[in-house]
Amino acid sequence: MTSPFLEAPGSAWVASNALAFALRDRFPVSPGHTLVVPRRLVPTWFDATAEERAAIFELVDAVKRQLDAELQPDGYNIGINAGEAAGQTVMHLHVHVIPRFRGDVDDPRGGVRHVIPGKGNYLAGRPSPLATGGAEDPFLRHIAPNRHRSEAARPGWARSATISRISCAAGSAPPPASPERRSTSASRVHPTASGPSRRALTQPPGCRAAGSSLSPICARRPGPGALVAPDRIRAPLSLQERRPGETAFVLVRLPGESAWRYLGVARYLEDEGLWACPGIDHQAYRALGSGRGVSRTLPGGARERARALVEELLRRPGAGAMVERYGRRCRIVGRTEAGGLLTDLAWVIVGRDDVKKNGGLLDEQRVNRLRYVEGTPRAATRWIDTGWALVLEAEAAEAGAA
């Protein structure tokens, strides 16, 4: 028996521990849909050991913390299919972690009970008001979050959440804009929750609204090379077209494809003059990128902290000392001002920060998930060097605490 989950590269993992790992669902039912899988190939939950079940739920918690930070969902469905009669199609135990957002279905009541059609919502027969007003109004999903620009200055719209034009960052013309619609929402709508699901789109919308927190990602027709880094997009806009602090939905159409693909939300960086989009994947960057590397941009200050870590290692245990951890053994030779190892150390520091924020283990999978764009083959990464950097970071941490 084989499993497609075991064929996924470690760079695709979003979390892991000694007995299990987590990765995004290839066919998500909502943004952030994640699977938690045991490393051992067992068919169902009832075939797993108590230790494996505990490891799986440890990662369910870790994934939930990640998704809370990235997407701010309004709820979750946690589900397991055990056996073909229950809908299981991959006979390798996996737990679904599905973020849910207000308005993603007309009536979410019943949740997982909807696995049997017609049996989910036992409250559906109770009469409810046609419209209630406020954030819970059943009509809100149909009118939010688009509205016309001319209404932006009206006092009553100060707290409205709006969506602006969705455009493209691909080597072809943007899709035609759909007519603008007038509407408003009295509740805050997070940009990621308002965006499309992470799947191919054949007819992406194209409206622009006023007072919005979202802007067009590009108003022109950039060709290949628009992705200037694995997480950066060059889409020059005039000040009249862009507002400070704006974000934008990113859609691309790759060469040879007819459908548009949603890559996530981008934010404009004033100091760089570029759009930062962490959702760019390996396939999109290889098709539309202008560089050879597949490493995301280091957060500010990470490289300087790596240099300080090097100085700590030179102080103790010192140049010429042997370091041995995690079954690896190496010699500290001397200072490095630039190059691969310094960058590897900087990304391990980023991974350490992520552990402090979200919990879990600091290992190669975590560091490389943060560092490389989704879908990057392991052969294209500095996987082995990440292991050496983890050894040195742990040694420096111990030396600094001594």
Image (spheres, rainbow, N blue to C red):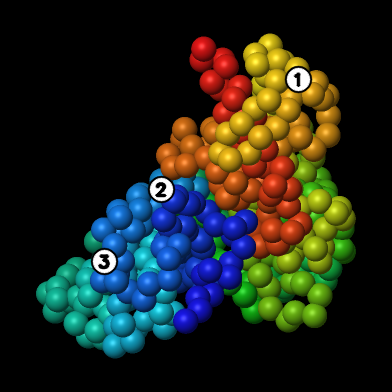
Residue shown at 66% from the left, 35% from the top: 329
Between circles 2 and 3, the one closer to the viewer is 2
Q: Name the residue under label 2.
A: 62
Distance between the alpha carbons at the discs numbered 2 and 3: 38 Å
Residue located 56% across and 39% down the image: 326
Residue occupying the point 31% across, 66% down: 48
50, 217: nearer the viewer: 50
Does 200 appear above or below 271? below
Tell me where residue 229 appears, x and y as whole percent.
79, 49
Q: What element carries label 1?
A: loop
Q: Position of residue 357 (x, y in %)?
A: 46, 35
Q: What is the number of the mark on residue 131? A: 3
Q: How many marks?
A: 3
Circle 1 packing at 10 Å, graded few (<14), some (14-19), many (20+), is few
Q: Few, some or many C-alpha atoms within 10 Å of disc 2 (few <14, some 14-19, many ≥20)?
A: many
Q: Nearer the viewer, mark 3 or mark 1?
A: 1
Residue 326 can be seen in this image? yes
Q: Which badge, 2 or 3, comes first in the chain's sequence?
A: 2
Mark 2 or mark 1, earlier in chain: 2
| Type of amino acid at the residue the image marks with label 2 | Ala
* Left or right of residue 164, residue 128 in this image: left
Mark 3: secondary structure? loop
Mark whose residue sits in front, 2 or 1: 1
The CA span between labels 3 and 1 is 74 Å
Residue 385, image x, y percentages: 72, 42
Crowding around mark 3 (Cα neighbors within 10 Å: few <14, some 14 to 19, many 20+) is: few
Q: Is residue 29 above or below residue 360?
A: below
Camera sees residue 304 = no
SS type, badge 2: helix
Residue at image mark 1:
320
Callout 3, which amino acid? Ala
Quarter residue 47 falls in? bottom left
